[in-house]
Structures are given as C-alpha cells and as structure tokens.
Image: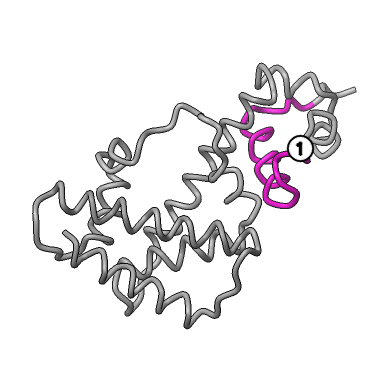
Amino acid sequence: MPPKEKVSKAKVSTTAFEMTREYGFSAVTARKLADRLGCSTQPIFRAYENMDELRADLFYMSTDHLIERMLAKKGKTPSYMTIALEYIDFARNEKNLFELIASVDDFGTQTISEFLKTDEGSRILGKIAGNTEGSQAKKLELFTMFWMFVHGMAALITGNRVEFSDREIRSYITKAYEGFIKTI
C-alpha cells in the first residue's frame, strides 16, 4: 500500500481560505477542515498549533488578496476612486473575507502609518493622494480621513445598514474626497 500523502501547511491554509470565503471563519472548524482535506485533524494541528494561529494566517492572506486587487485595478476614473470602489466591491463580493479583515482582533498588524511605509502602502497612498499639494504629513492626513470614510461606507454596505446605487457611492466618495482635500 502506498504511503498516505502528507497534507502540507500550504494545503491547509489554502483550503481554510476557500472555506472562509464560502462560509466565514466562524464556520471553519478543525473537523470540517479535515473533512474537506480528506484527513484527520492531526495534519492541521501539525501545521498550526491552534485555530487562532490559522485565523491569523487567513487574516494576512485575505489582506494580501485585497491589496493585490486594489493595486491591480486600473481604469479611467481617478486613482482614489478606483481604490475606493475596489475596496467596496471587495466588501460586497468577498463579505466573509472582509469581515475577517475588518474584525477588531489584533493580529499584530501594522498601524495605518506603518503600513503606508511599506511598498504596497506607498503605492496605495500615491493612488489616493495623487498630485495633492502639501507635505507628506498632509497626504497622510488625507489618506487617513478618506480611508476611514471608505471603510465605514464598506462596513455599512456589507452589514446591509445602507443601500446605495453605484452612482450614489461614486457621488459620496467624490464629495468626501473633495471635502477632505479642502481641509488640508
């Protein structure tokens, strides 16, 4: 009889990511994950000490997925609008991943200021701040105000607290952005 195929950490995390996308992380248990992988729970706990450790990995995988989407999106609309719309689209269409990202749990993540010092953060800041005049501190202020607005809107939409057409979303984003620019 051939030896059983080992279940890698990558396979565990990829499968858990797929399950999180489908059902949300709260529905991902070691037993359900093992069933999907066709193994016992032993390989899962060999790869991850506990489910909290797996959840942290899924948080980072979800964040990376979102950042890739935002940076890959190109269009004729202003960059700040493209980023905002992609974030809201992610919240709408990847609700379970968005809820994991938006959770208040601390996964040892960076603050906004720390994130903006990374390559991805700098690219997103550049797309949002664009050709805005002012110091780097003013651009960071613009980003922070704008991002809080967009995140709030995405959370409200995902939570079915508000219903906006795409046209209304664009209008609110434009008004907020233009208003924030006037303050810096």
Q: Is residue 92 magenta?
A: no
Q: Position of residue 178 (x, y in %)?
A: 26, 71
**Quarter occupied by residue 37:** top right
**Quarter occupied by residue 105:** top right
- Looking at the image, which residue sits at the far front? 183
Instruction: Identify the residue under disc 1.
Output: 28
**Image side of residue 171 versus residue 27, left or right:** left
x 57%, y 60%: residue: 156
x 51%, y 29%: residue: 107
User: Which one is nearer the viewer's eye here, 66 or 141?
Assistant: 141
**Image quarter hosting the N terminus:** top right
x 41%, y 74%: residue: 172
x 59%, y 68%: residue: 162
User: Which one is nearer the viewer's eye here, 129 or 145?
Assistant: 145
- Looking at the image, which residue sits at the far right? 1
User: From the viewer's perspective, is residue 93 above or below residue 171?
Assistant: above
User: For the stretch drawn in magenta, what is the main secondary structure?
Assistant: helix
* Crowd rating for badge 1 (residues with CA inside 10 Å; few <14, some 14–19, many 20+): many
Q: Position of residue 86 (x, y in %)?
A: 46, 65
Q: Is residue 20 magenta?
A: yes
Which residues make up the magenta segment? 5-27
Q: Position of residue 19 (x, y in %)?
A: 73, 45
Q: Position of residue 87 (x, y in %)?
A: 47, 60
**Image side of residue 111 versus residue 180, left or right:** right
**Image quarter hosting the C terminus:** bottom left
- Looking at the image, which residue sits at the far left? 134
User: Which one is nearer the viewer's eye here, 86 or 145?
Assistant: 145
Badge count: 1
**Image side of residue 162 versus residue 39, left or right:** left
Residue type at the position of mark 1? Val
